[in-house]
Image (tube, rainbow, N blue to C red):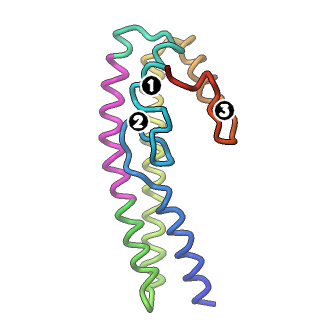
Amino acid sequence: MKKEITIALSALLLAVGATNVEARPGMMRNGGNAGMNNNCQQMMMQERLDVTDKQQEQLDALRVKYFEKLSAERRKLMTLERELNTETLKSTPDKGQINKLADQIGKQYSELMRLKSTHMADISAILTPAQRDSMRAWKNFRPMRNGAAHPMMMCP
């Protein structure tokens, strides 16, 4: 039973660890650009939301600060996940330490979500109400899920 739990937890940790990539502007969750690099995202925001030059400067400054903070928080998360993997794969893992690390990982994910929410609120504060509505519609749009990009989602 204990061995099965350890194996299941190890598999879960490896799966979670494999999904984490270094947070950088322009990087997608799958670790690649997928045609959506940072310049492309900026162009799409400018075109879709019709942001002014002043707004774009403010958004660029926000983006730089956000990714600096995000990178630091992701590094913390990756360190905790490595520690958990190490502990889990020991011949006699310490269940208390595993629980402690799992709790810390949960708190770190919460911190990442707070950071993201704060960033979105900061962006929202720069935009006009009409631009916020457009952004909300854009964020809620889900292109086809079979791997094909929607034509409107592609950059020139």
The location of residue 63, given as percent across then percent down, is 36, 30
Tell me the residue that label 3 is attached to.
143
- Rendered position, 89 above or below 128: below
Within-10-Å neighbours for mark 3: few <14, some 14–19, many 20+: few
Q: Callout 1: 10 Å neighbours few (<14), some, many (20+)?
A: some
In the image, what residue type sits under mark 1? Cys
**Disc sitting over residue 32 in the figure:** none
Q: Is the magenta stretch mostly helix, strand or loop?
A: helix
Label 3, label 2: how far apart the Cα atoms are: 18 Å
Q: Upstream in the sequence, badge 3 or badge 2?
A: 2
Name the one closer to the observer, 110 or 51.
Answer: 51
Please say if 58 is above or below 146: above
Q: Do the residues labelled 3 and 1 touch (CB within 8 Å)?
A: no
Q: Where is residue 45 in the image (x, y as percent from the top left)?
A: 48, 19
Q: What element carries label 1?
A: helix
Q: Mark 1 points at which residue?
A: 40
Residue 104: x %, y % from top left: 43, 64
Residue at mark 2: 26
Q: What stretch is highlighted in magenta?
A: 57-77
- Badge 2 marks a residue whose secondary structure is loop
Where residue 66 appears, as percent x and y from the top left, is 35, 36
